[in-house]
Image (cartoon, rainbow, N blue to C red):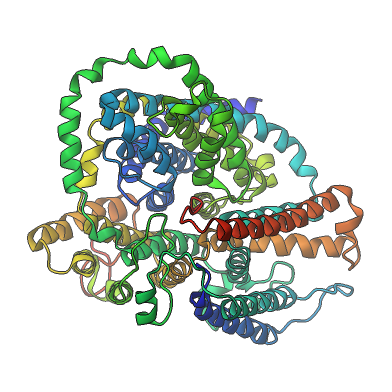
Amino acid sequence: MRSRADLAPGIVLLAFGIWVIVESRNISYTNLIGNDPLTPATAPTALGVLLSVLSIGLIVRSLVRRPAPVSTVSTMDTAKTGDAEDTGDADGTEPVPRWRAAQVGIAIVVCVGYAVLLPRLGFVITTPLLVAALIAVAVGRERPVVTTLIAILLPAGCYPLFIAALGLDLPVWPGGGPMR
Amino acid sequence: MSYFLDGLAASVTPFSLLVIIIGVLWGMVVGALPGLGLVIAITLALPFTYSMSVSDALLLLVATAAGAQFGNGVTAITVGIPGSPSAVLTVVEGYTMFKRGEGGEALFLNLVAAFIGQVLGAVGFVLLIVPLAAVAPSFLAPEMFALTVIGLLAVATLTAGDLLKGISALVVGLIFGTVGADPVASVPRFVLGIQENYRGLDIVAVTVGLLGLGELLHQLYTGTFAKSGATSAAAAAKALAKQAPQRLRVWAPLRSLPSVLVAATFGCVVAFFIGVIPGLGATAATFIVYQQLRLVARKPDELGKGSREGLVAQNTADNAVVGGELVPTLGLGIPGSGSMAVLMGALVLQGIEPGPNVLQTRPELTGTVSAGLVIAGLFLLPLGWAFSYYAFQLTRVWPAAIFSGGISLILLGAFAAEGRVFDIYMIILFGVVGFLLRRFDFPVAATAIGFVLSGLLETNFRHGVLITDGSIGAFFSRPITLILLLFATGMLVQQWFWNRRRARRRKDAQDTTDSPATK
């Protein structure tokens, strides 16, 4: 379990911790309460230091400790991918193939695309696209007819809930403004 | 006591009852869907609370929790697929009974267990929240600080088998919580020139992103959505049809009633107190109840082989734990689990800051919650009975559609909170963070709770320093505070030793008998 797998997150957290410390120094304030030893920067700085220390701990531990002898990861796969894959799933005994990370990446890009297009093209066009694209990300081109149906019916079901019931100012059609 | 009745009255209006029914149904369906549990059910219900009154919003979420905890168990019994980790043991007992041809009885016991869990959970909630409401207002900043520390450390130590990762995840959450105006002088911090950040990161965007979107992305990563439950659902349909005459044999469980009632009470009491402790939650509750059940079970040798007592104890635990979790969430503003962090987000959005103040200003809400727990339990009986026999069909639902629908609802819900596209971006950002934390085995609930409690922690610490003229003496001279802080330290040390001992034992054993993963 504990192995080199902790190295990468340790380094990222260390970078984040150091960034927090540096950025805390830029917090400008005037101490209004005379004898207050704490400033608005105290808590962020302390947390940044704490995170840095903890992440150094993670890094050191991942370098010093041998990978656990009993691992859910097959040694072959570890050698192939360079770092131990650990799904951390309750019953996930099989290693996760690499392309799954790409799959997650594409799903995230689809979500960001939705956020970009929603205000420009409106709910009616973008939401079915989002639903269909996410299904495609999960399973590829399997069952296109069902996918199309879901892509139409799900947003159609959401429409009365989100726009009619909640009275949202959601851009419905291309060109912005809500259409009532 | 009159405020209590006010809260009760607020939850028996026709609209409120409808809200409870919808919540129970929604929770059952989402809870029964493989891979989706309480947190996602509450997350997806959240947008619909925006236009409701505070009490209706609370009722919807409490009812959703009741339904979800019940729904988890149903597919576990009929198909052998747990709706969420807390139902893993239901598979052991319930599915075994089902395969033995006692499916009708297992489903009935599951339902009764959920009902008992709801009701006793509500009783426990009342018994604890009333004295808490009397005591909590006398807590000053130092006590609140110490309590928050205990809550945070409990979460960090208990959710992770790995202390270093648990505390790291917690600190990341605390850092997210410092974005925006500082709590004493309102000086902006970490706003990065983004106007929206001056108010601080949106609690709904962060909690739903970390726990909801992050979870769905992680399930995509682990391949949950690539599997299909259609074949097992077909088998369940066949088996259920064979067991159809059993539907009417409600009296069958009556024979085992005395032993089952003992197990139910035991499950409730233990699970309730586990719920009160921040950080443990439903999965831990069911496992601990199950382990300890041997002490009181009439037929301990049946455990693991389709034991009625085992089934009932876990399933009462699954529902009773919610009542326990609501105590620190509402009473102290300290949410103990991911689902409670999301529930707190819903309240904050309504302009309610849970904690001792709420017990003073809106005491009727405690009545609403207790009534909601009981009424949801009452509706669970007829709705759940019908649901039990059709729930297995839900495992037929195309996993890709669950994934796509879940994410779409989360993104739309993010937008619905304030009508800002900015919130969609934020939820995606925190979804990515949540995914990465899960991917590398950090307890993401600790991050979410750290974020939620960050402000409380800093405010109370700094106020504590201010009231003693700039020294930290207040944290040592006040006996209650000192005891609480010593307790927190002790907890940390004890957990560290415990983890070491467990690691050594595991090394000795060299077996793959991993301890059950607590969420």
B204, A139: nearer the viewer: A139
- Residue B304 vs residue A35: left or right? left
- Determine if residue B23 is in view: no
**Which residue does the image show at 46% across and 43% down from the upper left?**
B57
Quarter in which the N terminus of chain B is drawn: top right
Q: Position of residue B419 (x, y in %)?
A: 39, 64
B360, A134: nearer the viewer: A134
- Determine if residue B57 is in view: yes
- Residue A48 vs residue B488: left or right? left
Q: Name the quadrant containing residue A31.
A: bottom right
Q: Position of residue B53 (x, y in %)?
A: 47, 43
- Residue A109 vs residue B56: left or right? left
B201, A166: nearer the viewer: B201
Q: Position of residue A19 (x, y in %)?
A: 61, 85
**Which residue does the image show at 27% across and 35% down from the upper left?**
B78
**Image height of B86 relative to B264, above or below:** below
Q: Residue furthest left?
A: A145
**Which residue does the image show at 25% across and 16% down from the upper left?**
B248
**Image height of A106 relative to A143, above or below:** below
Q: Name the quadrant containing residue A76.
A: bottom left
B420, B245: nearer the viewer: B245
Q: Name the quadrant containing residue B271.
A: top right
**Image height of B111 relative to B456, above or below:** above
Q: Position of residue B219 (x, y in %)?
A: 34, 61
- Residue A155 vs residue B190: left or right? left
